[in-house]
Structure formats: structure tokens, C-alpha cells
Image (tube, rainbow, N blue to C red):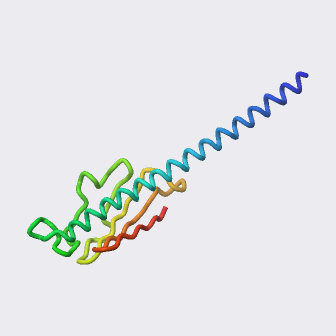
Amino acid sequence: MGQQQLLLIVLGVIVVGIAIVVGINLFNANAISSNRDGVVSDLNNLAAMAQQYYKKPTSMGGGGNSFVGWTIPPALDTTANGVYTISSTGTVDSVQIQGVGTELADGTNYVTAKIGVTPSIVKTYITH
């Protein structure tokens, strides 16, 4: 009877250990997914601001049908989700914004996404 109880204890410890490892993996996957969603959401917000700048007349502080001169507002270049930079300087008809998240996507690279903005189209590229 003592061996049987010892075997059940060892089996129980193994099952609990596996459950903990699976739980940690699920938590990490959820954190990465949540960070990626947050970065993409912030990028979409910045893209909308860039399009507003493009469409606003220069007399009102806008670009007058140009992305040249648009910058990321200082309060939004770093958020809880990540850090945002203009990866391709604004031209007359487009601008690219890159976001680097706070979570490691694959152990070495952080969650990263880019967004290309034109006057009428916003395209998101998720790299990690």
C-alpha cells in the first residue's frame, strides 16, 4: 500500500507540473497577442491623425494635401503598448509608421508592426 500511495503522489506532482507549464505558455501567448493588438490599435490611431493632417489646409496647421511635416505627437510616441517612430519620412502622398511593442514575440524579437498611410488607404504589416 505504501508504494501505491507514493506512485499516486508522483503521478499527481507530474500532472500538476504539466498543468503549470501549459498555463504559463497560455499566459505568455495571450500577453503577446494582447500587445500586438494594442500596437496595431495605436498605429491605426496615428494613421488617422496623419490622414487628418494631410486633409487639413496649411492655413489651419495641416499639410494641405501632403504628409510632409507630419510628426507623431510627443505624448503618443511612447505608450504602454510600445514605441512608435516614422520609419519612412512623410512624402507628399504617403508615410510609414513603425511600432515596437513591449512583449518578446519569439524570445529575441519584440512585437513589431508597420503601417503604411496614404490619403485614402491604411495598410498594416505585422512583422513579429
Pinpoint residue 32: horizontal percent, then vertical percent: 50, 52
Specify the farthest residue to the bottom: 92
Pinpoint residue 31: horizontal percent, then vertical percent: 50, 48
Tell me: 65 left or right of 36.
left
Is residue 47 positioned above or below 38 on the image?
below
Is residue 71 positioned above or below 22 on the image?
below
Query: Which residue: 37% across, 67% down?
Result: 115
Q: Nearer the viewer, residue 62 or 14?
A: 62
Tell me: 114 left or right of 58.
right
Pinpoint residue 37: horizontal percent, then vertical percent: 44, 55
Quarter of the rendering containing residue 1: top right
Tell me: 1 left or right of 51.
right
Specify the farthest residue to the top: 2
Query: Which residue: 25% across, 60% down?
Result: 72
Pinpoint residue 102: horizontal percent, then vertical percent: 42, 50
Specify the farthest residue to the right: 1
Specify the farthest residue to the left: 59
Is residue 66 positioned above or below 99 on the image?
below
Q: Nearer the viewer, residue 56 or 10?
A: 56
Query: Which residue: 55% across, 50% down?
Result: 29
For the image, the number of numbered tags is 0
